[in-house]
C-alpha cells in the first residue's frame, strides 16, 4: 500500500468485494458520522441491511448525504462496493465541485479470505454474485489509474492504516539539538490552588516528554484565549517558581513585549532565570500589540515604528549585558557607560524574535537567534519573507513556530471540541484553521514542519486544563 497519508478532510471511496474488510477498516479510522454505508442506509429506508428492494432509495439517500457533507468541506467515506465506474466518476465530480481531495482506497484482499468472511455472515452474498465482484475487483486498478483520483491507496488485507503512522525510530521520543516541541501555557484555570496547578502542569509536561514550557506574557488575558478577568500571572515570577522543580524543561516567555520592561530589565530577568534553571532559559521578545493592557497598567503604548525601534534596541542591549566583562559599550543603537550586570547567564539563552510584519521579520534575521512565526494561513508567505532577509544577512537564524491546534483523543473527541468552540464558523473551516486533529495526526504535521527547516514548535492547546490533558499530548512531544 502507499505510505502517503490520506488527506483530511477528503472524499474517500472504498473499493473492494464483499468481505474485503472495507467497513472494518473505515470504522477503525473514521467517525460513524463520516461513513456513509449503502448497507446501513438500506436498513434506514427498508426492512434491514440486506433488503435489496430498498437499494435505489438507499443510494439516492447516500448520494444526498455525500453531496451535503462534501459541500460543507467535511470528510465523507463512501462505504459501498465501489466497483461501479459510473458511480465512482459521480463521487469524483462531487469532490471536484467541493474542492476536496478525492481518494480511492482499494482493498486487495485474497479471494479465499473474502469467501471465508462472506460465509461467516448471517446473510452471505450469493456465491455467483461474489465471484462477479471478485472478478471486477481484480480489474478495477487499471480503471482507477485513468479516472483522475488525487490519491489511490491500496490496502492489502490487514495492513496498517495509511494515516497517523507512528513516528520513525529515528525521531520518536528523541530530542535533538535542533528539533524541539515546547508546551506553551496561555490559559490558567487553576481554581483555588494556583501554585499547585502550575507545578502539576510543568511536571506533567516533563513527564510527557516536552522539551520545555513557555508562558504567554500579557497583563490581561487576550480575547483570542479567554475573558479579560481570567487570571494570567506575571511570566518571570511564575517561571522562577517552575525553575525550582528540578525538571529538564527549557523555560521562557513567548513573547515578552519590550513595552512592559526596558531591555536591561529583560536581560537581568532572563539571566537570573537561566542561572536558577541551570542554563535552560530562553526569551521570546516582540514589539507588543495589545493596547488595552498598557492603558490599564499605566504603560505607554507608542506607535508601531517606535515600538519596533525599541525592539531593535532591546535585543542589542540584552546582548551587550550578557557579554563578558564590564567595559563600556558603544553600538549601533545603544550606548552604555559600563556593562556590569551579574549574574551572567549560565548558558546562552536563545533570543527568539516574534512578529508578523516585514520589519519584525527583518529584525529577527538581523538580530535574533530565531524568528517565531504563527502556523496560520499566512505562514508560507511570512516564512518566505523571513528567509529572504536571512539570506541577505548571511546569519544562521533558526525558525520557530507557534501552533494553536485543537487536539482530541480520537476523531470523535476532535469533532466534539470543534463543535464546542466553532461559534458561527462552519465546522470544516474552523477545523482547518485550527489544525483540528488527534495527537498522532498532529505529530505527523510536526514532522512535516521539521522537514521544512523549523527547529522548535511551541504548541498551545486551546482547552488545556489539567495534568492529564498534558500527558495526553505525549505523541506530540515525541514528534521531535
Image: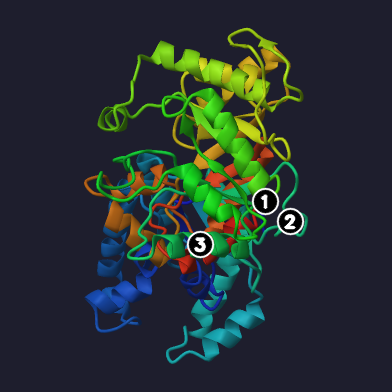
Q: CA distance from mark 1 to mark 3?
A: 24 Å
* 287 and 426: which is toward the camera: 287
Residue at which label 2 appears: 174
Dot 2 and dot 1 residues touching (CB under 8 Å):
yes
Residue at which label 1 appears: 480
> Label for residue 248?
none
Residue at which label 3 appears: 199
Residue 316: quadrant of the picture: top right
Q: Viewed as shown, does residue 413 lie left or right of 227? A: right
Q: CA distance from mark 3 to mark 2?
A: 24 Å
Dot 1 and dot 3 residues touching (CB under 8 Å):
no
Q: Viewed as shown, does residue 263 lie left or right of 71? A: right
Q: Viewed as shown, does residue 309 lie left or right of 251? A: left
Q: Relative to 253, say whether 88 is above or below.
A: below
For the point 65% across and 60% down, the residue is 246
Q: CA distance from mark 2 to mark 1?
A: 6 Å
Observer able to see residue 398: yes
From the viewer's perspective, is the residue at label 3 or at label 2 nearer? 3
N-terminal of the pair, mark 1 or mark 3, is: 3
N-terminal of the pair, mark 3 or mark 2, is: 2
For the point 49% across and 35% down, the residue is 255
Q: Relative to 384, say whether 71 is above or below.
A: below
Q: What percent of the width, then of the height, locates residue 122?
A: 44, 92
Amino acid at each position: 500500500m502507499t505510505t502517503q497519508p490520506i488527506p483530511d478532510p477528503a472524499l474517500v471511496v472504498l473499493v473492494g468485494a464483499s468481505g474485503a474488510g472495507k467497513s472494518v477498516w473505515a470504522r477503525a479510522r473514521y467517525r460513524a458520522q463520516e461513513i456513509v454505508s449503502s448497507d446501513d442506509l438500506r436498513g434506514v429506508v427498508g426492512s434491514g441491511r440486506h433488503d435489496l428492494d430498498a437499494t435505489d432509495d438507499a443510494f439516492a439517500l447516500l448520494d444526498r448525504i455525500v453531496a451535503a457533507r462534501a459541500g460543507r468541506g467535511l470528510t465523507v467515506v463512501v462505504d459501498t462496493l465501489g466497483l461501479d465506474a459510473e458511480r465512482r466518476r459521480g463521487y469524483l465530480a462531487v469532490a471536484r465541485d467541493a474542492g476536496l481531495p478525492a481518494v480511492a482506497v482499494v482493498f486487495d484482499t485474497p479471494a479465499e479470505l473474502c469467501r471465508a468472511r462472506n460465509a461467516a455472515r448471517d446473510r452471505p452474498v450469493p456465491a455467483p454474485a461474489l465471484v462477479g465482484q471478485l472478478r471486477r475487483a481484480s480489474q478495477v486498478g487499471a480503471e482507477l489509474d485513468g479516472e483522475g483520483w488525487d490519491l489511490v491507496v491500496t490496502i492489502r488485507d490487514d495492513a496498517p492504516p495509511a494515516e497517523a503512522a507512528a513516528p520513525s525510530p529515528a525521531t520518536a521520543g528523541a530530542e535533538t539539538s535542533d528539533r524541539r516541541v515546547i508546551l506553551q501555557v496561555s490559559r490558567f484555570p487553576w481554581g483555588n490552588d494556583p501554585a499547585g496547578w502550575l507545578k502539576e502542569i510543568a511536571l506533567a509536561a516533563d513527564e510527557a516528554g516536552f522539551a520545555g514550557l513557555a508562558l504567554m506574557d500579557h497583563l490581561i488575558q487576550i480575547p483570542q484565549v479567554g475573558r479579560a478577568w481570567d487570571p494570567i500571572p506575571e511570566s518571570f515570577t511564575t517561571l522562577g517558581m517552575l525553575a525550582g522543580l528540578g525538571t529538564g524543561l527549557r523555560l521562557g516567555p513567548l513573547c515578552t513585549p519590550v513595552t512592559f520592561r526596558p531591555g536591561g530589565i529583560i536581560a537581568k530577568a532572563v539571566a537570573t532565570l537561566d542561572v536558577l534553571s541551570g542554563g535552560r532559559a530562553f526569551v521570546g521578545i516582540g514589539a507588543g500589540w495589545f493596547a488595552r493592557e498598557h492603558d490599564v497598567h499605566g504603560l505607554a503604548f507608542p506607535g508601531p515604528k517606535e515600538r519596533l525601534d525599541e525592539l531593535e534596541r532591546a535585543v542589542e542591549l540584552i546582548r551587550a549585558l550578557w557579554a563578558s566583562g564590564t567595559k563600556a559599550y558603544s553600538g549601533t543603537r545603544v550606548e552604555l557607560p559600563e556593562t556590569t550586570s551579574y549574574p551572567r547567564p549560565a548558558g546562552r539563552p536563545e533570543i527568539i524574535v516574534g512578529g508578523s510584519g516585514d520589519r519584525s521579520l527583518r529584525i529577527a534575521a538581523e538580530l535574533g537567534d530565531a524568528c517565531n512565526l504563527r502556523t496560520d494561513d499566512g505562514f508560507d508567505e511570512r516564512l518566505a519573507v523571513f528567509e529572504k532577509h536571512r539570506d541577505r544577512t548571511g546569519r544562521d537564524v533558526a525558525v520557530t513556530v507557534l501552533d494553536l491546534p485543537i487536539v482530541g483523543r480520537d476523531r470523535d473527541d476532535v469533532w466534539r471540541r470543534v463543535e464546542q468552540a466553532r461559534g458561527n464558523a462552519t465546522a470544516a473551516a474552523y477545523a482547518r484553521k485550527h489544525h483540528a486533529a488527534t495527537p498522532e495526526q498532529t505529530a505527523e504535521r510536526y514532522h512535516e514542519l521539521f522537514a521544512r527547516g523549523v527547529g522548535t514548535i511551541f504548541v498551545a492547546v486551546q482547552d488545556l486544563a489539567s495534568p492529564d490533558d498534558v500527558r495526553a499530548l505525549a505523541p506530540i512531544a515525541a514528534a521531535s
